[in-house]
Amino acid sequence: MVLGHGIDIVQNKRIADMLDEHGERFITRCFTDRERDYAESSPDRRIERYAARFAVKEAVFKALGTGWRSGLSWTDMEVCRDPLGRPVLQLSGGCAEEARKRSMSQWSISLSHTSDCSVGSAIATGSCEDSS
């Protein structure tokens, strides 16, 4: 059963400006080490990779129904890739706890980007049996 859905679109220039203005502070606040390693591994696509992951994280906050608020951290979620290269979501900390409270046991995410914009989608599923 679908329990939450979020979608977000971000202009890549906005992320480029955040990187220019706030640099390492922005990166460490919003992205895990693995996300950073992935984005930085391709200098030509660095901005798009950060922007797409940022959009997915915004979409996850929307799917959780919480938005970004105290007790939830951008790094409580990580966009990884499975062996086939598909994006997968890993939750930890406050985000994992919010998902558990809402019986959100599985996540499907998707991301895409052009040179101008990046989009992320997150769908949370679970079952009534997951509720306690």
Image: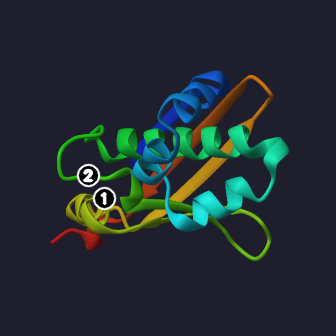
Above-or-below relation of 9 to 64 = above
* Residue assigned mark 1: 95
Confirm whether residue 1 shows in the render: no
Q: Residue at x 66, y 44 (%)?
A: 111
Crowd band around label 2 with a 10 angstrom C-alpha radius: few (<14), some (14–19), many (20+): some
Above-or-below relation of 106 to 24 = below
Crowd band around label 1 with a 10 angstrom C-alpha radius: few (<14), some (14–19), many (20+): many
Whether label 1 touches label 2, CB < 8 Å: yes
Residue 63 x/y as whole percent = 38, 44
Residue 49 x/y as whole percent = 69, 46
Above-or-below relation of 55 to 37 = above
Quadrant for the C terminus, please.
bottom left
Q: Is residue 59 left or right of residue 71?
A: right
Above-or-below relation of 98 to 10 = below
| Residue 86 vs residue 75, the one in the foreground | 75
Q: Residue at x 58, y 25 (%)?
A: 17
Q: Quadrant location of residue 33?
A: bottom right
- Residue 42, numbered label: none
Q: Residue at x 76, y 77 (%)?
A: 83
Specify which label sits upstream in the sequence, 1 or 2.
2
- Residue 72, numbered label: 2
Dot 2 amino acid type: Leu
